[in-house]
Amino acid sequence: MKYHYLNLPQTITFTNGNTITITYDARGRKMKKTVTQSGNTTTKEYRSSFEFAGSNLEAYYHEEGIDTTKSRRSFGK
C-alpha cells in the first residue's frame, strides 16, 4: 500500500495484481478512484456529494444517507 502525502491511501496493490488508485485534491477529498481487476479498468469520479461513472450519476451522498440511481441516467459534466 502506498500513501498520499496527507497519509491517505493512494495505491493499493493486491497479490493477484489487481490495483486500486485514488486521487485526492489538496484538502484530502477523494476526486477519482480507478480499479484495475483482471485487466479491466473502471473509474469513478467524485464531485462534491456526487459519484459518477463516466457521465452517469451513480450516487448522491447527503446527511441522511446515500441516494443511488437505478436507471443509469446520463448527466453532462
Image: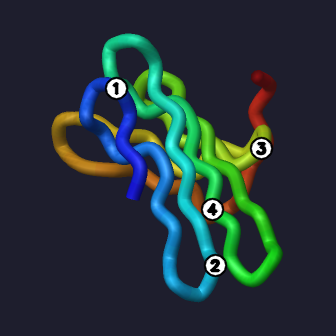
* Cα distance between the residues tagged 1 and 2: 24 Å
Q: CA distance from mark 4 to mark 1?
A: 21 Å
Q: Which residue is mark 1?
A: 5
Q: Residue at x 41, y 49 (%)?
A: 2
Quarter of image, res 76: top right
Q: Rate crowding at label 1 as few (under 14), some (14 to 19) or many (20 or more) other CA atoms within 10 Å.
A: few
Q: Secondary structure at mark 2?
A: loop
First-in-chain label (1 vs 2): 1
The image position of residue 13, as x and y in percent, is: 52, 68
Check disc 4 and report its element: helix, strand or loop.
Answer: strand
Name, please, the residue furthest toward the top.
26
State if disc 1 and disc 4 touch (CB < 8 Å).
no
Q: Which mark is residue 36?
A: none
What residue is drawn where x is 28% and y is 26%?
A: 6
Amino acid type of the residue tagged 4 in the rendering: Val
Q: Is residue 29 above or below residue 74?
A: above
Q: Whole-percent x and y of residue 19?
A: 59, 66
Mark 3, residue position: 54
Q: Tag 3 or tag 4, which sits nearer the N-term?
A: 4
How many C-alpha atoms fall within 10 Å of the one at disc 3: few (<14), some, or many (≥20)? some
Pick the front one: 27 or 64: 27
How busy is the neighbourhood of tag 2: few (under 14 within 10 Å), some, or many (20 plus)? few
Q: Which label sits in the foreground, 4 or 3? A: 4
Q: Residue at x 32, y 14 (%)?
A: 27
Q: Nearer the viewer, mark 4 or mark 1?
A: 1
